[in-house]
Structures are given as C-alpha cells and as structure tokens.
Image (spheres, grey):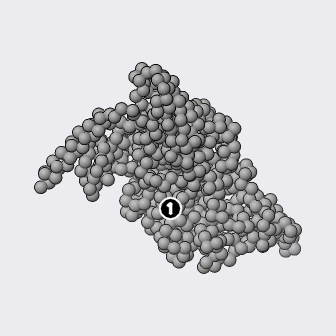
C-alpha cells in the first residue's frame, strides 16, 4: 500500500511544478499595483510588438444567439500601467439610445486572468462612463514581461443589424464585426482615441459550430469542416491580422478561385452572392482581379493570403465596408455597368486591405489609410474602365442615363436623357461644391456627426486633394511615395508625424505647403481674375485676387488672337498684378487653366473675358426653354 502512494505523490509534485512554471512567482514590486504612476505611458511611436493570440470556441444558435469561449494570450503588456477589457458594444448602445447597461447584448459568465477567476458584478467598473470599456480590477494577476492569458465565457444576443453588426430583419443573415472583447492598454488618463489603437495584430484560431443548413463566411481560412446531421463545425485560422469577422447565412452562393499574388504565393478569393445577384459575378471577379493586379504592380504584394467578399442584404442597416481579409458588399438588384457600382466600392475596400488593415495606426490617424485608399480606387477605375456615364435614379432605385436637374418627390421634372460621360473627379466636384462646411481631412474621418458630405465614406475631398497633388508632381512620384510607405510600414505602426516628415523630405516646398493646407488644415481655396489692364501698346496687367485663406502657386494664362501666354504666380498676396508683353489682340485671361488645384471652390471666376460674349447666354436660354417644354408636356399628360 505504501508503494502505491509513491507514484501518486510523484505525479502530484510534477503537476504542481508545471503550474509553478506556467504562472511564475515574482517579487511584489514586479506586479502591477493600483494606483499606477502617471509617467508609465504607452509609446505609440514604437514598432509593432509580438503578436497576441486569440482563440475562439463559438456555438451559433438559430435564434441569433451565440455562446463564446475566448482565450487571449499576449507575450507582453509593454510595461504600461494597466489593462482594459474593450467590449465593442456599438450596437448595444445604439439599440438603447443611451449608455445604460440594462438589457445589454453581452452577458459574461466567467472571466479568468492567468487561471485566477475574477468576480463579475452586474455593472463592471467602466472608465469615464464609456460603457464599451470594462476595467479589470485585479491587475495584480497580470504579470509584467511574461505571457498572460485571459479566458472569457460569454454569450451575445444579436440585435437587428446596426452598423454591420447583428441579424437582418428577415433573419436570413447574421454578421459579426467588431464583436469580441479585446485586452488593450490603459493610460493614466483615458482618451477616447485609445479605444481602437490598431497597433496590435493577432494570430486567430477558431472553431465555429453552426446548424447544418447554415453557411459560414469568415475572414480567415477554413482548414477543416466536420458535418453531422444537425451541426457543422468549421475550423479556421487567420494570421497577422487586426480583426476576426464572420457571417452566417441561410442561403448564399459561394464561388472560389485562386489569384497569383507572387510567384511563390497565391490568394484564395471567395465571392458570396445571393441568388438574384449571380448575374453580377463576372463583374465582381473582374474588378477584384483588376484591383489586385493594379495594387500588386504599383504598391506591392497583397498583404494577406485570402480575401472574402460577402454580399449583405438590403433589408436592414448593412453597408459596404472593408475589414481584414473580408469585404461586405451592398448592391442594388438593378445596377447596370455604366453606374460602376459595385465596382468602385470594391476597388476602394481592396485598397484598404493595404493601407488600413495592413498598416496599423491610431484611430486619430485613420485618415491616412482612408485617404490613400480612396485615391487609389479612383486610379484603378481610370486605369481599367471607360469614363462613367452620367445618370440619375428614378424613385431612388432605377438608374437612368442622363441628368436630373429638378425633381419633386423623386419624380424628375426637368431632366435631359442622353448618354454623357464625366471625368472621374467631376461628380466628386459636384458633391464638394454642395457643402460649405469643409474641415481638415485629418479631422473629417474622426467626425462622429458625419456632416461633411452626403457620401461621407467615399473620401471626396481626399481624392480631389491627392489628384491635385498628383498634378503638381506626377502620378509616378505620388504612387512611389505610397509604395514606400507600404513597404516600410507593413505591420508597423504609422502615425501622422512620420507621414508629414516623410512628405516634407520628398516634396518641394510648394507641394508640401499645399498638402498641409488640404489635409491638416481647414483652408478654403478660391482665386479669381479681377480684370485686365492695358499698360501700353505691348503691355498688359492681369489682376489676380485671392478670395480664400488657402494659398497655392498656380499658372496664369493670357489668351490673344494668335497665342496663349503662360506665367506663374506664388498666390500669396490678396491682390496680384501679373504682367504680360504682347502686341497681339488680347481676348481673355485665366488662372489655373490646367485645373491643377481641384479644391478651388469656384472655377467660374477663374477666367475673365474683355469682350462680352453672348453665345453662352443664348445656349442657356435655349436649354431652359427645352426644359420648360418637357415640364409642360409631363404635367399635360398627367392631367
């Protein structure tokens, strides 16, 4: 009997030694004590540290409820003063219209840190009334400079979708973005910009169990699928990525193909479309291939090993958006190719894989990637597609080629039905002119009110500003700068200061001054020709006036009956006299004739004609009569 106790005792001692190895015993001063010193701050300029590991065991129920066991493992908390559990409860707050935790969609049943269970109260401690952030009180369980593990057991009851989170109204699709808790660093003074410091990349593994009739779309690569009579279990891996996204469908069509990324690497592409939208599959495949080709040739290899494009239904609050390896696509049932929808949105969200998802930035600097991606999308469209056709929508649904100039209750009254084309920036200019409120681009993307544009997510001002900068430099020079940024900061932290210093070193003084005004300041550009004075028989003076506070150098043209004379001005003074020498008859003058600065708010005052011209007024009068005739015919047919 005594001999039996010996091996048992040895086994117990071995088990205890293993426990002792997994959670080391350190001196008390090596633990995080509360309160923490003010000086210990997170260094946001440092390069990317060791990746954290996230693993999920997810059980999806038919009723739109999921049970989750989540394990977070990190190698280092960067010697910061505390850690915070960040629960992305955007939809929860929206559904309650306040910051109350009552009826919350998250329900935690267990939280462990390094094996030690933490007490869960009905209302965990929060920071500055920010209900998305749960402060973990027992910081002494987080060991400095050592691997730490957080284990979470919780359930989520999915609401009707809000901002790409939740289930569609018909229940045929549930989408989870920004859905899982994450451990983030906490400064001594909490700042809201710290909520989503995207300076961390994770290695994800997941096991997702869904009813057997459901179909899964996921941002990672499915390595194995186990199917039984009632359930399907997907095993998923996703490396060096900032977020893990998945959706569950009742019915969806999946098309898979492989895109060659490099000679030694390929991309697995999944396109998921509903039955009525299968006719758009060739267009989806076409724009995906063209976008990846353009970015591979001009920027670099695609940063991930897979890409999923998942269509979202139009019966709830879903939208087109780009996530790591995963793009949600919203598209109307009737969308002719001349509208270039969904092509442009797909091109923009694929570009975001490079400059938003592969390059980590703080939330305050998100404008960098968003602006570059929006500009690159316009270049992709210009490279591979014909000029888009002007169109308007009848009852906000049916696209019709032509211009709708006046409507009542979505019924066109004055319109022209013809097939006219416009430059890639023409529609952006129309939307840009429509709004008087023009904040700095660096502040626009962080504006929670989103009052800047009727289409705020398209980055209208950013595209116009980068196109203007391209015209001052060259396409190759600007694209080369973006290529260098991507090469240097792929999975390394980029901030505004570094970008500004990089551009300051690479751009000439005039171009950098324009960049600073367009992106970092709220400057208004507006120049006009005030008049032309004859000084003598062979000398003329063009009076240029700067009406806005934005300053940029530009060309001034003097048109004669035989020639066009060009010179430049720095644009700094409020009133400038530009002299020309010519013996020819002078007809007109114009500032910025090549339209280098697309941010000028009024091109109509950029030119000045000496002799009165009548053809423009006559043409306008004829068009007006035609429009009124159309209106009378419409009203007559109604009566």
Mark 1 residue crowding within 10 angstroms, few (<14) / some (14–19) / many (20+): few
Determine the secondary structure under disc 1: loop
**Where is 613 relative to 400, above or below?**
above
Residue found at the very far front of the displayed protein = 536
Q: Residue furthest bottom?
A: 122
Residue occupying the point 40% across, 28% down: 587
Q: State the quadrant of the N terminus.
A: bottom right
Residue 276 as seen in the image, left or right of residue 22 = left
In which image quadrant can residue 511 be found?
A: top right
User: Which residue occupies 76% across, 61% down?
Assistant: 41
Apparent side of residue 561 relative to residue 77 in the rendered image (left or right): left
> In which quadrant of the rendered image does the C terminus lie?
bottom left
Whether residue 520 appears in this view of the structure is yes
Report the number of discs: 1
- Residue 422 in which image quadrant: top left
Q: Position of residue 500 (x, y in %)?
A: 66, 45
Instruction: Give whichever of 624, 346 is nearer the camera.
Output: 624
Front in this rendered view, residue 562 or 183: 562
Residue marked by disc 1: 449
Q: Position of residue 413 (x, y in %)?
A: 24, 50
Q: Is residue 345 visible?
A: no
> How far from the left and from the top, in percent, is residue 384?
45, 33
Q: Which residue shows up at 74% across the image and 51% down it?
A: 46
Is 213 placed left or right of 366 in the picture? left
């Amino acid at each position: 009997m005594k001999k039996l106790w010996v091996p048992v005792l040895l086994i117990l001692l071995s088990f205890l030694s293993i426990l002792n190895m997994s959670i080391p015993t350190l001196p008390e001063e090596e633990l995080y004590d509360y309160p923490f010193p003010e000086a210990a701050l997170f260094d946001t300029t440092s390069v990317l540290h060791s990746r954290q590991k996230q693993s999920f065991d997810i059980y999806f129920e038919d009723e739109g409820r999921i049970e989750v066991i989540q394990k977070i493992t990190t190698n280092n908390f960067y010697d910061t003063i505390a850690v915070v559990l960040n629960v992305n409860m955007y939809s929860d707050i929206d559904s309650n219209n306040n910051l109350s935790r009552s009826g919350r969609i998250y329900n935690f049943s267990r939280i462990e840190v390094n094996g030690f269970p933490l007490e869960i109260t009905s209302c965990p401690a929060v920071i500055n009334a920010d209900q998305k952030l749960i402060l973990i009180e027992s910081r002494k369980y987080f060991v400095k400079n050592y691997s730490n593990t957080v284990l979470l057991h919780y359930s989520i009851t999915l609401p009707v979708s809000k901002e790409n989170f939740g289930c569609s109204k018909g229940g045929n699709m549930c989408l989870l973005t920004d859905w899982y808790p994450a451990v983030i660093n906490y400064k001594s003074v909490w700042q809201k910009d710290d909520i989503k410091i995207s300076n961390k990349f994770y290695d994800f593994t997941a096991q997702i169990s869904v009813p057997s009739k459901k179909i899964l779309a996921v941002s990672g690569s499915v390595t194995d699928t186990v199917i039984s009579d009632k359930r399907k279990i997907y095993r998923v891996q996703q490396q060096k990525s900032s977020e893990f996204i998945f959706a569950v469908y009742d019915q969806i069509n999946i098309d898979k193909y492989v895109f060659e990324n490099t000679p030694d690497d390929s991309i697995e592409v999944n396109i998921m479309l509903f039955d009525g939208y299968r006719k758009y599959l060739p267009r989806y495949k076409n724009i995906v291939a063209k976008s990846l080709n353009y970015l591979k040739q001009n920027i670099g290899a695609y940063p991930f090993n897979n890409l999923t494009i998942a269509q979202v239904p139009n019966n709830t609050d879903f939208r087109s958006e780009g996530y790591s390896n995963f793009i949600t696509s919203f598209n109307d049932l009737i969308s002719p190719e001349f509208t270039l929808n969904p092509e442009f949105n797909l091109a923009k969200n694929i570009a975001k894989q490079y400059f938003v998802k592969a390059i980590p930035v703080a939330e305050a600097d998100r404008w960098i990637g968003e602006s570059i991606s929006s500009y690159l999308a316009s270049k992709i469209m210009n490279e591979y597609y014909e000029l888009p056709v002007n169109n308007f929508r009848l009852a906000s649904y049916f696209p019709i080629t032509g211009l709708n100039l006046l409507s009542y209750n979505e019924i066109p009254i004055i319109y022209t039905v013809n097939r006219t084309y416009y430059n890639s920036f023409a529609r952006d200019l129309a939307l840009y002119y429509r709004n008087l409120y023009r904040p700095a681009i660096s502040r626009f993307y962080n504006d929670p009110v989103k009052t800047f544009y009727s289409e705020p997510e398209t980055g209208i001002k950013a595209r116009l500003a980068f196109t203007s900068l391209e015209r001052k430099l060259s396409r190759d020079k600007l694209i080369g700068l973006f290529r260098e940024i991507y090469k240097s900061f792929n999975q390394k932290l980029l901030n505004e200061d570094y970008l500004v210093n990089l551009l300051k070193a690479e751009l000439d003084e005039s171009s950098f001054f324009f960049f600073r005004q367009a992106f970092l300041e709220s400057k208004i550009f507006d120049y006009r020709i005030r008049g032309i004075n004859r000084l003598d028989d062979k000398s003329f003076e063009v009076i240029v006036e700067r009406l806005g506070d934005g300053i940029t150098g530009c060309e001034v043209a003097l048109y004669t009956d035989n020639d066009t004379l060009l010179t430049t001005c720095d644009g700094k003074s409020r009133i400038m006299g530009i002299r020309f020498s010519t013996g020819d008859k002078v007809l007109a003058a114009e500032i910025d004739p090549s339209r280098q600065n697309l941010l000028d708010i009024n091109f109509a005052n950029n030119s000045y004609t000496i002799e009165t011209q009548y053809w423009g007024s006559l043409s306008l009068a004829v068009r007006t009569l035609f429009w009124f005739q159309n209106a009378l015919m419409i009203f007559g047919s109604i009566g």
